[in-house]
Image (cartoon, coloured by chain):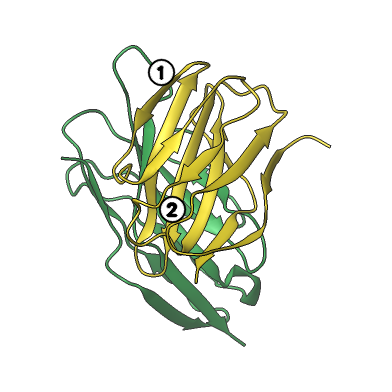
């Protein structure tokens, strides 16, 4: 069965420190992974996806199929990074290319000044 | 202004009453989704629809119903059969890339 695990419910770091939000997944097919972010009083929005292999707001995430992980990293955290972060796995439905997303339980990141 | 509109933002309901949450989009996206967000539980999928007049159950569909009569609209009804309806409900749409776009959410409180 498909599953996304974010082991840390809360994570706190000081400004300028490195940060890593962990995400592990379980899926027998070819995974497509995403990170979504929800800042205070804002809508949930896409941060990045593994297919694009890009860096957004200094964040990167590498898909490690051997370890079934998709950890989100940033070398120098900023106060404005404080938010709820969700890891998500997309699976394909039969006859559909859009499929559905499975979300982890989320990690609340707090960056202290 | 393009986007996803959920209404109402806050809703109170007495036990035993059905309530319908509205979700409208003008992004011309084919797929629409309803998620329930509870603290510590992440987002759980209630129902989703890939095309008009078709929808599928998600992981927690019991006590909920939906319809998709128009591409722009995907209303969610929380019925009296839902045992724990107090929650934050999120509607989302998706385009071909699979990226989800979310509404601002509706908070339902059962008194």
Q: Residue furthest right?
A: B1
Percent of width and height locating residue B15: 44, 63
In the image, residue A97 sits, relative to residue A51, either above or below, namely: above
Q: Residue at x 25, y 28 (%)?
A: A30
Question: Mark 2 — on which chain does it sit?
Answer: B
Q: Nearer the viewer, residue B8 or B25?
A: B8
* Percent x, y of residue A110: 52, 79
Asked whether A34 or A20 is in front, the reply is A34
Q: B19 or A74, which is in the foreground?
A: B19
Residue B47 is situated, as x and y percent measured from the top left of the image, at: 40, 36
Across and down, in percent, residue B2 comes to 78, 34
How far, Cα to Cα, is label 1 from label 2? 23 Å
In this rendering, do the residues under marks 1 and 2 share a single chain?
no
Q: Specify whether A110 is left or right of A27.
A: right
- Residue indicated by mark 2: B36
Q: Provide the secondary structure element on which disc 2 rests.
A: strand
Quarter of the rendering occupied by the N terminus of chain B? top right
- Subunit that carries the residue with mark 1: A
Q: Residues within 10 Å of mark 2 (few under 14, many from 20)?
A: many
Identify whether B111 is placed above or below A91. below
Badge 1 density bin: few <14, some 14–19, many ≥20, Cα 10 Å: some
Taking B7 as reference, is A40 above or below it?
below
Residue B13 lies in what quarter of the image?
Answer: bottom right
Q: Is residue A82 above or below residue A54?
A: below
Q: Is residue B21 left or right of residue B33?
A: right
- What chain is colored yellow? B
When asked about the image quadrant of residue B27, the answer is top right
Residue behind mark 1: A97
The answer to whether any part of residue A18 appears in the image is no
Which color has been applied to chain A in this rendered view?
green
């Amino acid at each position: 069965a498909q599953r996304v695990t974010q082991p840390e419910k809360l994570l706190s770091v000081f400004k300028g420190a490195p940060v890593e939000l962990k995400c592990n997944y379980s899926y027998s097919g070819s995974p497509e992974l995403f990170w979504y972010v929800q800042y205070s009083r804002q809508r949930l929005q896409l941060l990045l996806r593994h297919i694009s292999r890009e860096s957004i707001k200094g964040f990167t995430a590498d898909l490690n199929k051997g370890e079934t992980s998709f950890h989100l990293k940033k070398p120098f955290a900023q106060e404005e990074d404080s938010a709820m972060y969700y890891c998500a796995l997309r699976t394909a439905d039969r006859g559909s290319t859009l499929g559905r997303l499975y979300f982890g339980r989320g990690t609340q990141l707090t960056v202290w000044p | 202004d393009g986007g996803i509109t959920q209404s109402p933002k806050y809703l109170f309901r007495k036990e035993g009453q059905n309530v319908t949450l509205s979700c409208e989009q003008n992004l011309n996206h084919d797929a629409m989704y309803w998620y329930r967000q509870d603290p510590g539980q992440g987002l759980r999928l209630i129902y989703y629809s890939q095309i008009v007049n078709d929808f599928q159950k998600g992981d927690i569909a019991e006590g909920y119903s939906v319809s998709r009569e128009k591409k722009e609209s995907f209303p969610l009804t929380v019925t009296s059969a839902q045992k724990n309806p107090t929650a934050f409900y999120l509607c989302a749409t998706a385009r071909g890339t699979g990226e989800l776009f979310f509404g601002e959410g509706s908070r339902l409180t059962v008194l």
